Image (cartoon, rainbow, N blue to C red):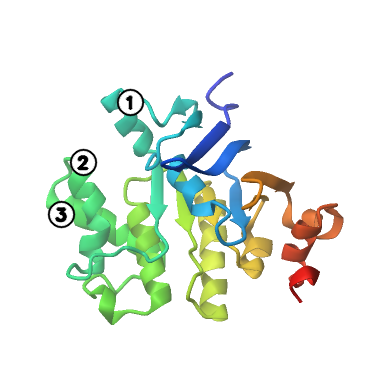
Amino acid sequence: MTASTTPMIQVENLTVGYGQDIIVDDVSFEVSRGETFIILGGSGSGKSTLLKAMIGLLPPKKGRVLIDGEDIATEDEQKHLGILRKIGVMYQSGALFGSRTLLENVRLPLEEFTRLPGRAQNLVACLKLNIVDLKGYENYLPAEISGGMKKRAAIARAMALDPEILFLDEPSAGLDPVTQAELDQLVLTLSKNLGMTFVIVTHELPSIYTVADRVIMLEKESRKIIAEGRPDHLRDHSDNPRVRQFFQREADPEKV
């Protein structure tokens, strides 16, 4: 299998959890290059746990995660760093450093992982902020901007090292509908113009219908994937009542 045909991400028989608790059990799926892939499910279904395993923060109890054909859990330090350079992560809160300006926040990965001189680091950071429509806000502190702008700045930082994959954890959480829609359009623009692969954890239906090429749905009780496909197809044709309830935004009859 050549590099061009290898899926961007392969999750193979993955089991993850904490201590003796299994959160996600024996799941397998692939993410294609340039795809916008969404992980969804109810509270406690393991969405964020799965994301942590995919970016190498949580070691598998079983199975493996391959990024561009390479195991992210490899013990080879140089190979591991090379894999990490292919991914960027935006955490749910944005995780910006409050005492640093947006420029300084975006510059952090460049300081850590490159030997670029300071002027070049600043130039790259400015370019990334410009891409997410934050030109002119380079010297603002996180406390001085809106929640949506913080999410954009966090995406700019995740893009600092020109990753091939962006992982976004609940990017629309806490945002008003207009700001959510603007963030969705940013994802679409980055996907179209830069060919980036996105893996997004979210339960926001408008965002799912707008940006997703394909989704998987996790279930807390079974710890498994209970649905995979295009969101509109799952909404209209799934034979699983829980999947239909989610996509059609219906209450569980047993709890009404």
Foreground mark, 2 or 1, reads 1
Q: Where is residue 134 in the image (x, y as percent from the top left)?
A: 36, 70
Label 2 – label 1 distance at C-alpha? 16 Å
Q: Where is residue 213 in the image (x, y as percent from the top left)?
A: 67, 51
Residue under numbered circle 1: 79
The quadrant of the picture occupied by the N terminus is top right
Q: Which amino acid does label 3 sit on?
A: Arg
The answer to whether the residues at label 2 and label 1 have Cβ atoms under 8 Å apart is: no
Left/right placement of residue 211 relative to residue 18 reads right
Q: Which amino acid does label 2 sit on?
A: Thr
Q: Earlier in the sequence, mark 1 or mark 3?
A: 1
Residue for point 17% across, 44% down: 116
Q: Residues within 10 Å of mark 2 (few under 14, many from 20)?
A: few
Left/right placement of residue 33 relative to residue 234 reads left
Q: Which of marks 2 and 3 is nearer the N terminus?
A: 2
Left/right placement of residue 49 relative to residue 43 reads left
Foreground mark, 2 or 3, reads 2
Residue under numbered circle 3: 119
Q: Residue furthest left?
A: 118
Q: What residue type is labelled 1?
A: Lys
